[in-house]
Structure formats: C-alpha cells, structure tokens
Image (cartoon, grey):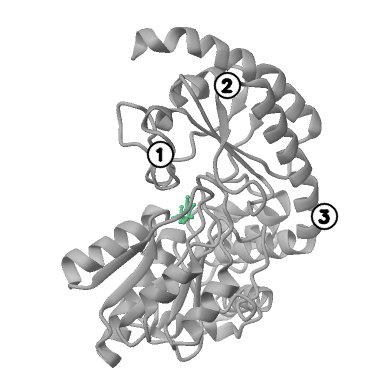
Amino acid sequence: MIYLDHSATTPLRPEVLTAMEPYFGSTDREDNSKYGNPSSIHLAGRAAHAGLSEARGTIADILGAAAREVILTGCGSESDNAALRGIALARRKQTSANRIVTTVVEHHAVLNTAEDMRDFFGFDLTLLPVNSDGFISEDALAEALGDGSDIALVSVMYANNEIGTVQPIGRLGALCRARNVPFHTDAVQAAGKLPLDVNALNVDALSASAHKFYGPKGVGFLYLRRGTPFHPFITGGSHEGRRRAGTENVPGIVGMATALALCEAERDVEMARLQLLRDTIIGHTLQAIPGSRLTGSPTQRLANHASFTIQDVEAEGILIALDLAGIGASSGSACTSARQQPSHVLEAVGIPAEELAGGLRLSLGYSNTAQQVELLLQKLPDIVGQQRQIVPAAL
Ligand code: PLP
C-alpha cells in the first residue's frame, strides 16, 4: 500500500517500538524490568520513573522549556481540552476575563470545546474568520483582543490538518503577550515538522499528539508555561504536578519522546525531501486534472501536505478507487461527502458549495518515495475521469 494519509496518523517507527518494549514488562524479554508504576518505591517503579523523567526531559529540551512545564496526556484532543478548559476557567477565576478567542478553522478538539465552554460554562466566544489561504488576520486578532482585560484565552492552531496552512504563531503570540493574554496553539499537525521552540513561538500552551509523528496512539502532551493560570480537569492523584491525574502511560510516553527526538534530528533534511514530493504532487495534479484547486496556502503550508478540491466528483468515490489501486488517501476531514456535513474548513476558506464534496488530502511521510508519487500521479487523472462519469448518476 502507498500510504498518503500521514495527517490522519503515522506508523510507529521501529526505533520507537524498541525504546518502548522494556516498559511493558513482557516476560519473554530479558530487559523486562521497567513495567512498574512510576510512583512505586521498588526497583520496577524506580525504573519506570527514570524512563518517564528522561522522556519528559527530552520533550522539554525540544520545546526549550523546563521539564515541569510538560504535562503528559492521553492524546491531542485531551491536550487541547486541558488547555482550553484549564486555562480559561482558572483565568476567569483570577481576573473575571470571560471571552475565548479562537478561529473558524480549528480542529473539532478545539472548536467543540470552545463551544462547550460557551454553552455550558457561560464564556463569550469570538471565532476569527480566515482568508482564502486559511490565514487569520493579525489586525482582526488585535481588534478582538482590545486591551486584553476581557480575554480568558486565545487559541490558534499552528498548522491546519485539512488544508496544511501554517499560521504565523510567533507574531500572533506577540500580540497576546503584549496584552498579558494566555495564548495556546494546537500543534498536533506541526509537531515533528515545524520548530517547536515555545519562546520563539510566544506561546503559553502548546498541544501535541504522538501518533502524528511516528509515536504510539493514545498519548500526547501539553506544554504549559510556568505561571499560566490552570485548573486541572482530570483530578485524582498528584501526578503531573496535580495538573493531570492518572497513572502515566510510561511505554507510550517513552515512545513519544523517542519519536519526537528522531523527527527533530531529521527534520530539516526530511522536510526538504517531502517538500519536493509535495510540490510534484501539487504541480502535476493542478496541471493534469482540470477543475482541481489547491486548498490552503501555496507557500506557507506543511511540507508533507497537498490538499485539493476536485470539481464534479465526490471524495468518497475517489478515495475508494484510490484504495482499490493500493493508495491510502483522505478527503481531509471525517465527512465531506455531499450527503453529510461539509467541511467547516473548506467552507471557511470560501470553497463554492458545489465543490465542497470533492476534497482530497494527500499527506506524505518518511516511507514515501518519488516512485510512489509517480505511480499516484499516473493513476489519479484516470480515477478522477472515471468518477466524473459515474457521479452525476449517484447524485
Ligand atoms: N488537533 C489537530 C489539528 C488534529 O489534526 C488532531 C487529530 O487529527 C487532533 C487535534 C486530535 O488529536 P488526537 O487524535 O491525538 O486526539
């Protein structure tokens, strides 16, 4: 299979699995003594605790943060939830600021959480619009912030999962910092592909998820800058500095840190390689398929991410035909079929209603080669042609 859906999830790198194995404690291994509860005093607990601390330190170093500023979580969605709920509630208690500012193109982990904070916790919500490339306007953010006194939290995603656009997080963060407003970024798609230096980014909180960068599923982290108001939403034991209770997923966390360190070490070379493949996909698709349109920014986009809308087809048909041809791709969001909800991101960037059903996302990763891209580009125009013949009947 030619896997072109790395924005959905990535395979585990072999080095990551190797690093994780001792922490499962499987009895058929020699190095199986690290399965303890990291809170336990005995040898197995101490070994697990050492692995946990080392992993936290690795992640902190990559962020340019202190180890205590890294909260380990169960996934990217949890990290987003913890940031929005935890910071907004605590800041409101401190200052009575009652407005959450975010954007119309966020992942649902942020968007639905912000709406929940409005509907069930009484926050006011400002959703900033985007232009046709998917960027918010810095002026619009500055205007929404005012003097900042009413703003509980701003959350703007680093890179968009559907259209790949990369926001100028450092500049947006500076606007928030100048007004002492906490600034969170959902970096789930950015981690492993873009710089994560939290000081250069001017962020107070940053969310990431291991399964997007060749780590295991079901583990993520939230960077939380020292001094940022925070109210935990998973309460219980004193884990994670009382900010997220629950026995830590030690193998997953060790795997996440190993995966992130590998991506960081290879980032410049690998992103340059993927960008060439991406640009080949974009150039050929736009040229060979009439009625295809690039979505997201042509320049400020993830190096591994090519996304389109294709007129007169339904994404589902294309994806099934690609799958039959041995190619795994995505429409860019869970449901873009004409019969279901159209993508809120494609709507937000102004894609005409009649094109909303034809979203296609091809997201590259480290196993993809130039030969695979060539094969894709040979097959795609024919698949689109065939779908165009059958779709009118289906609609
Ligand atoms: N945020 C973005 C931008 C994402 O793309 C995703 C996953 O697709 C998430 C959050 C949620 O991450 P997770 O699947 O780890 O909950």
Front residue (pair 97, 379): 97
The amino acid sitting under disc 2 is Leu
Q: Quadrant of the C terminus?
A: top left
Residue 111, compared with residue 201, is above or below; it is above
Q: CA distance from mark 2 to mark 3?
A: 29 Å
Q: CA distance from mark 2 to mark 1?
A: 17 Å
Q: Residue at x 57, y 21 (%)?
A: 322
Q: Earlier in the sequence, mark 1 or mark 3?
A: 3
Mark 1 touches mark 3? (CB < 8 Å): no
The percent position of residue 118, horizontal first and vertical second, equals 22, 67
Residue 195's quadrant in the figure? Answer: bottom right
The amino acid sitting under disc 3 is Val
Residue that carries the numbered disc 2 in the rendered image:
322
Q: Quadrant of the N terminus?
A: top right
Q: Which mark is residue 76?
A: none
The amino acid sitting under disc 1 is Ala
Residue that carries the numbered disc 1 in the rendered image:
334
